[in-house]
Amino acid sequence: MKIRWKTKKGKWLLAAAAFLLLWLLLPARKHRMEVIVERPDRRDLTELIPASGTIRPVVEVRITPDVSGEVVELFVREGDAVKAGDLLLKIRQDLYLSQVEQAGASLGSLRAQCARQRAEVRQARLNHERDRKLYELNAVSAAEYQASKTELEVAESGLRAAEFAIRSGEAQLKEARENLLKTTLYAPISGTVSRIGVEKGERVVGTSQMAGTELLRIADFSRMEVGVEVGESDIVRIESGDSVQVEVDAYPGRSFRGWVTQIANSAKNLDERFNQVTNFAVRIELLPDSVKFLPGMSAAVSIVTDERRNCLTLPVESLFTRNKETFVWTVGPGNTAEARKVVTGIQQRDRIEIRSGLSDEDLVVTGPPGTVTKALTEGQRLRVSERKSKTS
């Protein structure tokens, strides 16, 4: 019985010793972290800023009347081509004809009054001149001489008032005539009638009263643009003249070209209640094309802000930051993790330019996901699996 116990105990001791020895003799690779590595590759990069918006004419004039009244004639329809100076519509003129007649009659009366006042001035001047000579001969009293002088001054003052009244009457007549002319509207530019907002017989309000009624619009469809909004973090990289790639929903599978023509100087807050989204309006003119662009078509644009040829690149997910500086994990001597500081450049989708800090032969850790930013530590031993990058 005693011999069996010793035998059993010896077996347990032997197994424990074997396990301890095996653990001590395990190859160091059992403690290595498995990572995916990639060598930087050279390719051409184009930095793009995406945005979306709608197509509209570069030039579109909204026509509103200067005077109020009823539309009595409408000479165009939507889609009509017009030239600058073509007759568009007429507003009823009865009221404005009456105002011209009234202003003309009033001016005539004022001129007649002014003529009578001039005659009174001439007579008062003759009387005063006669009394002056008699006063010098002591033939009239000083009171009579002073009375004639005062009479002349009053007559001259009345003449000045009459002349001012004439100028006021002339201005009123001029305004009445201009208002009469404004009842007939002509095309200010050549183009296409893109919208008509009134019908014959409808009353409209002139711009002298609030904003005025929008009668119609004339657009130049030979020049079209896309209006987009860009966030504040991207707007600083955009400049006038930047080239733009445009895709229009109405023409799937096709790509069009354009360029940035205007960048807003002030921001437009899309959510004013929370003031969280700050965008800037950007206008992009489309290069002429054989297809027809219509106002309101949806378009997606990619603004080209920078380009690099044959530059060293890495996947974006291989980078991490420390103290506002950018690093990558490289494979150092003995397959150990080594943090390397790099300077980056432009980015195109999932690839980013490496301007300094790496060479074409360095092995850089790119995965698995989460390894770069969380799992690795300096000097950690690695078991690497190299992945060949795909040149785009």
Image: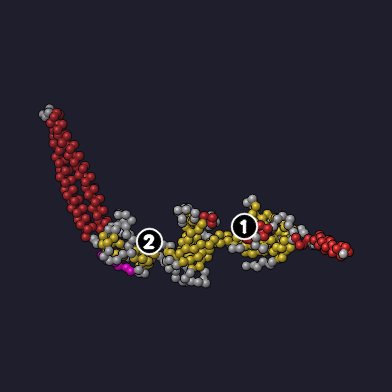
- Check residue 331 for magenta coloring: no
Q: Residues within 10 Å of mark 1 (few under 14, many from 20)?
A: some
User: For residue 27, what is the image quadrant?
Assistant: bottom right
In the current view of this chain or complex, which residue is farthest to the front? 1
| Image quarter hosting the C terminus | bottom right
Quadrant of the image for the N terminus? bottom right
Depth order, front residue of 381/104? 381
Would residue 337 be found to the left or right of residue 244 on screen? right
Residue 61, disc: 2
Check the image and name the residue furthest to the left: 139
Q: What's the residue type where badge 2 is placed?
A: Val
Residue carrying label 1: 345
Provide residue 373's location: percent of width, then percent of height.
65, 57
Front residue of 340 and 219: 340
x and y percentages locating residue 330 in the rendered image: 71, 59
Q: Is residue 157 left or right of residue 350?
A: left
Dot 2, how many residues are within 10 Å of its Cα: few (below 14), some (14-19), or many (20+)? some
Location of residue 86 in the rendering, given as x and y in whole percent from the top left corner: 32, 65
Q: Is residue 247 above or below residue 106?
A: below
> Which residue is at 56% across, 62% downward?
48
The range drawn in magenta is 72-77
Type of amino acid under label 1: Gly
The residue drawn where x is 33% and y is 56% is: 211
